[in-house]
Image (tube, rainbow, N blue to C red):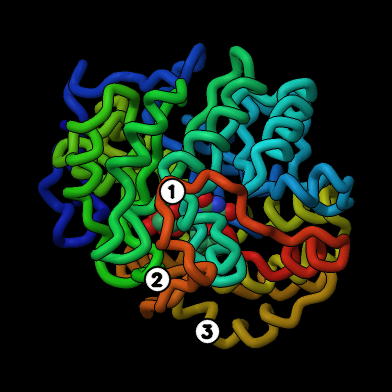
Amino acid sequence: MSELKPRFASDENMDVPVAKPGEFSEFRLGPLKVWPPVVLAPMAGITNYPYRRICRELGAGLFVSEMITARGYLHGNRMTRLLASSQPEESPRSVQIYGADPVDVGEMVASLVGDGVDHIDMNFGCPVAKVTRHGGGSAVPVKRRFLARIVRAAVRSAGDVPVSIKVRMGIHDELITYLNAGRVAEEEGVSAIGLHARTAAELYSGAARWFAIGELKSAVGIPVLGNGDIWECWDALRMMRETDCDGVIVGRGCLGRPWLFRELADVFDGREPGGPPALGEVVEIALLHAAALADFFGEGSAMKQMRKWMGWYTKGFHGAAALRADLSRVERLEELRNLLRSLPETEPFPKRALRMGRAKRGGQQRVKLPEGFLDDLEDDTPPRGPRTVAEIEEWERSHSGG
Ligand SMILES: Cc1cc2nc3c(=O)[nH]c(=O)nc-3n(C[C@H](O)[C@H](O)[C@H](O)COP(=O)(O)O)c2cc1C
């Protein structure tokens, strides 16, 4: 008789059943069919080609690039171009774009499609002051006609390549925009809409309000992708069941835990997942990641990035506590290997780390909008974004995406 292993889950997810046969189906993104219905969230500084590849090799679904700004891309900014790039084995190739000028956006989309991109996602959820202060990011859906104009430019240029948009619930609770954004998206021929179920004012605080995902699903006829607080594969099943959404977008939950995609594939295929890796396997994955980053960005930049990644990979593991300070200063791949060699391989994955915050702290903000922005909500004039090379480069350095 096979022995039943206890489920590896937080208390709230102990009794969530895996998918029953036929309970969920692939979601469609134009000609693409995505199964399991799982998307790696676009995350600035995170979802570059090396990390997308690692997540994809462990699981399945759709793996979106971090946001690529139209201005930087069209200007030929070296780093922006590198971040937009991929390798021939990546299929489908999915790129998130950010732009607030319909002409730029149209031109950029045409170029990406010409370069073989299979899916374009548009970022209308960025809450960062630098972006909303100019009327970009999460401020765009406030102006229905402007949103329509910019989305239309992308859809036209994309031809047969599907375009999705990603939004937040709105600016704050008195300025909610997601239902209007959904209607605009549908009217303009967008293939799917992703909703991070928080307002821009909420940043990453509190629990994502999944009810909004259900409301959006009832309001539109295009696929709805739910986003916010998928920390465990069980959360994805619960979100799909509670909201009837067509797929889920996974952000912080996979930071330092790319095997979350393996677990997601398991539960959507109706299997109990095998449980997370012990520290030895985590180290192996982290080293693969480090080597892939070094190939892509060069060793110096890769190790700078690994400093933050090692905090996430080792989160909650007692055996790593003494090394954390050294890991946060690492400069060479060889040094990283040597440090990690001393960790206790058999230490099991700590349950308390499942739902620990990663990357973004809580806290709310007062969202900055341009002077007089709310006076004419029917205005469809593009906002003034960064224009000079210096402004674009400064903006590219400081934006944080989502
Ligand atoms: C480090 C980081 C960078 C992000 N960058 C982007 C981005 O470039 N584009 C975007 O649409 N959202 C971005 N986001 C937001 C995520 O895509 C996602 O909407 C958010 O994290 C909520 O999902 P989660 O609760 O699963 O993390 C970012 C989030 C994080 C943590």
Please state which of residues 297 and 189 is positioned toward the viewer in this rendering.
Answer: 189
Which element carries disc 1, helix, strand or loop? loop
Q: Is residue 328 visible?
A: yes
**Residue 52 sits in which quadrant?**
top right
Provide the residue designation for mark 2.
357
Three-letter residue code for mark 3: Ala
Which mark is first along the chain, 3 or 2?
Answer: 3
Q: Using the image as rendered, state which of residue 398 and residue 377 is in the foreground.
A: 377
Residue at 27% x, 59% y is: 208
Q: What residue is shown at x 76% (from left), y 77% (from top)?
A: 330
Amino acid found under the numbered disc labelled 2: Gly
Mark linked to residue 143: 1
| Residue at image mark 3 | 321
Amino acid type, callout 1: Lys
Local packing at callout 3 (Cα closer than 10 Å; few below 14, some 14-19, many 20+) is few
Closer to the N terminus: mark 1 or mark 3? 1
Cα gap from disc 1 to disc 2, whole angstroms: 33 Å
> In the image, is the residue at mark 1 within 8 Å of ligand 1 by its beta carbon?
no
The mark closer to the camera, 1 or 3, is 1
